[in-house]
Image (cartoon, helix red, strand yellow):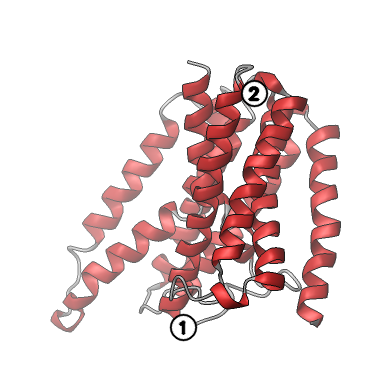
Amino acid sequence: MKKKKMRVLMFIISIPSLIAIILFLPHFNHLALNIILLAVSIIGTLEVSNLIKLEKNILEKILPPIVGGSIPLFTYLELMGILPKGSLHLLVIFYIFLILIKSTFRYSPEKFSLILPSIGYNFLVLFYPSLFISYIIRFSFFENTTCVILTFMFIVYMNDTSAYLFGSLFGKKSRKIFLVSPNKSLVGFVAGITASIAFSILFFIICPQVFAYKFIFALIVGVVIGISSILGDLVESAIKRSADIKDSGSIIPGRGGIMDSIDSLFFSAPVFFYLLTWIHS
């Protein structure tokens, strides 16, 4: 019960604060929000790195989280024109080369079995969650940026909140749909997707330009983002289940780690980005 109260308190504090930052600090393509996203990316990448129980050398402990966590930074600088186009792509390709080439320098035959796990670790930490978060950075360069960001944030977080609330109250008999997250319930899933559709329609009324003034697009976005939010949550649950832990960290009271709080964003961010690109094409 104490954890639930702390979770509600954190929601009451964090969401209005985030809305205030989005509304009142839109300068330089929402630089303030993007700095927060960069910090979230680095911390989240470190949490993922710590989840993977693998023998790591000092290079693997430090470099992957730094490079992976910095993808949102390179995304912002490139979109602002501070870095030349293709800089992010070059960074990623160079690091992939480094990961693969490094695997050829395993001089101890006893450690050859670690080559594939090491490559897998480096690839996961490079892209998860930083690549997904970088798409939220890209929202800052749409027209009607503030409306776009708020629309995305409410569709995703009201999905998460409704699924948690209705699942806790009414979903006890419909749980264990997915073994990786046995506390998730069918009632929670339905409530979450319904909330995503409802808030997509609400923002169609408030900011119809986000959906190119077409109601059908708002419905499509609500359904698709509702589903992708749930999938993002389940994927993170699967990773934690594999690591045999309950929370990705302890940085947020009542929630656990950064990853526990933003997992619903992972699949939703690129999906929302490409949906809007398609809607306005």
Q: Position of residue 34 (x, y in %)?
A: 67, 40
Q: Residue at x 76, y 78 (%)?
A: 3
Image quadrant where residue 144 sits: top right
Q: Nearer the viewer, residue 177 or 211?
A: 177
Which one is closest to the eye, mark 1 or mark 2?
A: 2
Query: Gap between marks 1 and 2, in whole Å?
Result: 41 Å
Residue type pointed to by label 1: Asp
Would you place residue 143 above or below residue 16 in this image?
above
Count every numbered label the image shows and give the total: 2
Residue at numbered disc 1: 244
Q: Residue at x 40, y 28 (%)?
A: 86
Judged from the image, the secondary structure of the residue bearing numbered disc 2 is helix
Viewed as shown, does residue 134 lie left or right of 171? left
Q: Residue at x 67, y 48 (%)?
A: 195
Residue at numbered disc 2: 210
Q: Position of residue 139 (x, y in %)?
A: 61, 31
